Structures are given as C-alpha cells and as structure tokens.
Amino acid sequence: QVQLVESGGGLVQPGGSLRLSCAASRSVVSADSMAWYRQAPGKERELVAALWTGGVTYYQPSLKGRFTISRDNANNALYLYVISLKPEDTAVYYCNARFADEDYWGKGTLVTVSL
C-alpha cells in the first residue's frame, strides 16, 4: 500500500503562482509513473501532467507552458509548479502514482483562483 498526501493548495489571485507537493510513503524511484490530475466543480477529473521513469513528461496541451511537473527522488515527492493562474484553474488537484500496474491516489488539495 502506498499513501500519497498532497499539500500546497489554497486561495490564489489570478496571475499568481503556487507549488503543489505530493509526499509518497514509498520510494518514488520505483514508480512506473506519477501524475497530477484535477477535478473542477461539476466536471470530470482530467490529467494535468505526468512523468514516467526516465524523465519523460506529458502535459495537457492546453496547459503546457504554465504547469511544470517534477519529482524529488531524495524526498519521495512529486511537485507541480503553476504560474499565471486563471480562475478556470480552480479545482481539486490529485496526485497519482503507479507502482507495478497498480494506481494509488491522494485525497487532493483544493486550489481556488479568485480575487
């Protein structure tokens, strides 16, 4: 079993930036992949960015340029850096990790972009 705990969410003004963190209870080096998803009110969960072993990354095309995913092997953490936040970025952001074809999810951290 793997526990994932997200943090870093909160209220941010439009145009602002933040860093979301995901702490894993297992070495992230052994993860097949790690990713950030988000779910806005009334919408389905969507993939924001993913990172595979070897450093290959994927970003949702509409978000590329404002979101950056990175992994910290020493601290067993995954990060998501976001700049130029927009109201439509308001959502619960979830951390996902896949180990040996099994998916694990955190409980999410809420990001609200508003004046």
Image: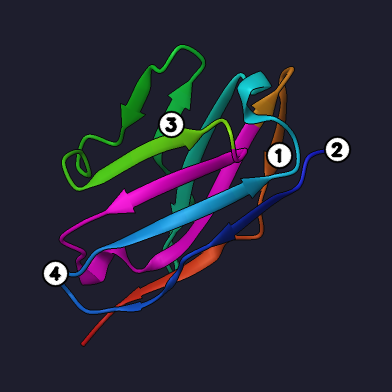
Q: Vertical placement of 66 versus 113: above or below?
A: above
Q: Assess whether residue 92 is covered by the magenta stretch.
A: yes
Q: CA distance from mark 3 to mark 4?
A: 23 Å
Q: Which quarter of the image is occupied by the N terminus?
A: top right
Q: Which residue is depicted at the point 25% across and 82% down?
A: 114
Mark 4 or 1, nearer chain start: 4
Q: Assess whether residue 99 is covered by the magenta stretch.
A: no
Q: CA distance from mark 2 to mark 4?
A: 38 Å
Q: Which residue is depicted at the point 56% across and 42% down?
A: 77
Q: Which residues are magenta?
A: 75-97
In the picture as drawn, the residue positioned furthest to the front comes out as 74
Q: Is residue 110 left or right of residue 1?
A: left
CB-based contact (under 8 Å), mark 2 and mark 3: no
Badge 2 local density, few (<14 within 10 Å), some, or many (20+)?
few
Q: Which residue is depicted at the point 71% across and 39% down?
A: 104
Amino acid at dot 4: Gly
Q: Vertical placement of 34 versus 77: above or below?
A: above
Q: Quadrant of residue 67?
A: top left
Q: CA distance from mark 2 to mark 3?
A: 21 Å
CB-based contact (under 8 Å), mark 2 and mark 1: yes
Amino acid at dot 1: Tyr
Q: Which mark is residue 104?
A: 1
Q: Position of residue 101 (x, y in %)?
A: 71, 19
Q: Which residue is mark 2?
A: 1
Q: Secondary structure at mark 1?
A: strand
Colour scheme in the image?
A: rainbow
Q: Is residue 14 left or right of residue 104?
A: left
Q: Which residue is mark 4?
A: 15
112 vs 18, nearest the viewer: 18
Q: Which residue is mark 3?
A: 50
